[in-house]
């Protein structure tokens, strides 16, 4: 078995609306970038990239069939090529497992989506059970609304505390040249914005539609050290699924995230995540989620997500900055979302995060989520 | 022994339908526009291995990511490389209507490079043969910029002789 998996290069597109591009043009751009950084190409003799894992979502290919264009476009024609139809953080974990198993040494991992192709809500509706969920028009926004309501009720989390997450992340995002929705919004602006799914207001939801892609190259320890003088190591990984049906869960808690995080911490030898981590990139599809997921990740106690934002712990300059990049609330596509959390952690640990750099960052956590009301989570811990 | 009555199945019709748009981009986009406006097929050439790519693409997959080079106008005549005649009922995905059986489709190697797959008429196994010369029959009115702007391929006059 290989010792450690290193991330040796990352590339991101700008996150905007790419109506003039077929997805292949987006993929060419981002994969040429990441391959250029390492000088690697796909090879079948062990001297290049051995394999690839790609995360996307079929419905966002337009009339379907999004994965068929992938392999030839990135140069993986007649190479091992695995596809993931869920959040991109899972693709990173599967890529790392290919290396940890000893099956491959160097893996290209890509996440890409064009949300502008069709209605995200309608696709999410298809993600629900066709007998119990679809016909009542449930989608992930409606599910999140129920979860936010239940979370606020059970733990006394206030609308102001959720709005503060938006203000923090949109401010952080001003230092991220790749996002479109960073701004100087105030708590008042957020709370006056249109209600979408009570208590979630439009400014508390990830902007839609946004198109984009992320690519990264993972390598086994000895190759990673040769490919870059700034490898970022994956120290822990955990994944866990909860019940699909919302009625089987108390939505105010996120038990599957607790399990995923504990799995990752155990692997990484992390005992006190709030103290040992220098930053976290958490999937804030909705503002309340950053607070609830922080609890699940053990960055604070159960029901203490509100206090965490009130104390400024998670702000830039706080003890544990969360989403220095601006997070998903600044506009990152679904699927790409979790992989982009990993990419941002890599930039931070390489000291290449520009104006959003957390000084002296040595350890980081990336989180991806998928499914209604946070059904499945993926937690990846990293160090330089 | 008394026979147990078979339970009646519950039936729930359910249609999945999502409106979507699609960006063809500069490569596929140019081909489809040429088909719609000029009844012409275009491909592009890999500067590394020299092969003609149809459909045109941003990169040559076989040369592992080499970016596409020059545009090449392709012929709408070619040679039937492979074909089959099918006899099972077939719902045309563009109309939802049944298509009369039998029907034939084939891989056509275009003169000068490139290959595509299309309907071959008539779907008569006695008349179709590998290597026969075929040519596109274009839709004269109402072309949309899609592969069905070609109705089908049929034997060329020279081949019929
Ligand atoms: Zn080539």
Image: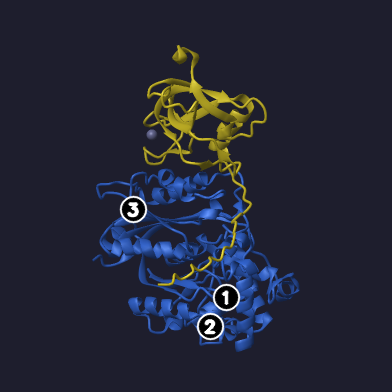
Chain colours: A blue, B yellow
Please tell me which residue lies in front, A184 or A68. Answer: A68
> Among all residues in the image, which is located at the extreme front?
B1
- Quadrant of ligand 1: it is top left
- Residue B126, quarter of the rendered image: top left
Residue that numbered label 3 is attached to: A51
The local secondary structure at tag 2 comes to loop
Please tell me which residue lies in front, A126 or A352. Answer: A126
Q: Quadrant of the N terminus of chain A?
A: bottom left
Q: Image height check: is A242 above or below A40? A: below
Circle 2 chain: A
User: How many numbered dots are placed on residues in this image?
Assistant: 3
Residue that numbered label 2 is attached to: A253
Give the foreground label among 1 and 2. Answer: 2
- Residue A109, quarter of the rendered image: bottom left
The local secondary structure at tag 3 comes to strand
Q: Image height check: is B34 above or below A365? A: above
């Amino acid at each position: 078995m290989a010792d450690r998996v290193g991330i040796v290069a990352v590339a991101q597109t700008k996150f905007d609306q790419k109506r003039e591009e077929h997805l292949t043009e987006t993929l060419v751009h981002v994969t040429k970038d990441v391959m250029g950084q390492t000088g690697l190409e796909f090879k079948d003799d062990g001297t290049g990239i051995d394999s690839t894992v790609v995360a996307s979502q079929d419905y966002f290919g337009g009339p379907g069939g999004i994965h068929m264009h992938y392999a030839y476009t990135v140069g993986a024609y007649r190479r091992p090529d695995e596809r993931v139809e869920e959040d991109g953080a899972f693709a990173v974990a599967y890529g790392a497992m290919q290396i940890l198993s000893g099956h491959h040494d160097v893996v290209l991992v890509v996440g890409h989506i064009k949300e502008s192709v069709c209605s995200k809500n309608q696709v999410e509706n298809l993600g629900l059970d066709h007998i119990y969920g679809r016909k009542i028009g449930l989608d992930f926004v409606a599910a999140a609304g129920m979860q936010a309501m239940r979370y606020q009720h059970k733990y006394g989390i206030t609308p102001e505390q959720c709005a503060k997450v938006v203000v923090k992340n949109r401010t952080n995002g001003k230092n991220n040249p790749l996002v479109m929705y960073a701004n100087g919004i105030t708590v008042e602006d957020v709370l006056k914005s249109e209600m979408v799914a009570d208590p979630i207001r439009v400014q508390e939801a990830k902007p839609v539609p946004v198109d984009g892609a992320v690519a990264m190259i993972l390598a086994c320890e000895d190759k990673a050290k040769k490919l870059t003088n700034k490898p970022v190591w994956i120290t822990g990984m955990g994944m866990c699924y909860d019940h699909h049906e919302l009625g089987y869960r108390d939505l105010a808690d996120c038990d599957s995230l607790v399990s995923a995080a504990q799995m990752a911490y155990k692997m990484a030898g992390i005992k006190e995540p709030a103290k040992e981590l220098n930053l976290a990139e958490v999937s804030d599809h909705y503002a309340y989620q950053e607070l609830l997921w922080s609890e699940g990740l053990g960055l604070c106690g159960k029901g203490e997500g509100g206090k965490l934002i009130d104390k400024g712990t998670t702000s830039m300059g706080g003890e544990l900055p969360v989403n220095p990049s601006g997070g998903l609330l600044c506009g990152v596509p679904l699927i790409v979302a979790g992989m982009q959390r990993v990419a941002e952690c890599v930039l931070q640990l390489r000291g290449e995060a520009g104006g959003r750099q957390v000084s002296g960052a040595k350890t980081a956590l990336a989180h991806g989520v998928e499914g209604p009301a946070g059904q499945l989570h993926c937690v990846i811990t990293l160090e330089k | 022994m008394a026979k147990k009555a078979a339970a009646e199945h519950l039936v729930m019709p359910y249609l999945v339908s999502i409106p979507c748009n699609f960006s063809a981009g500069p490569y596929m986009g140019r081909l489809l526009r040429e088909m719609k406006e000029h009844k012409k097929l275009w491909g592009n050439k890999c500067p590394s291995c020299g092969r003609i790519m149809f459909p045109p693409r941003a990169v040559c997959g076989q040369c592992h990511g080499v970016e596409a080079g020059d545009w090449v106008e392709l012929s709408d005549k070619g040679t039937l490389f492979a074909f089959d005649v099918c006899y099972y009922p077939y719902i045309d995905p563009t109309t939802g209507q049944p298509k009369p059986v039998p029907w034939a489709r084939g891989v056509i190697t275009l003169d000068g490079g490139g290959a595509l797959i299309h309907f071959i008429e008539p779907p008569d196994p006695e008349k179709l043969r590998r290597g026969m010369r075929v040519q596109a029959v274009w839709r004269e009115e109402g072309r949309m910029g899609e592969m069905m702007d070609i109705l089908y391929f049929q034997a060329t006059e020279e081949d019929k002789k």
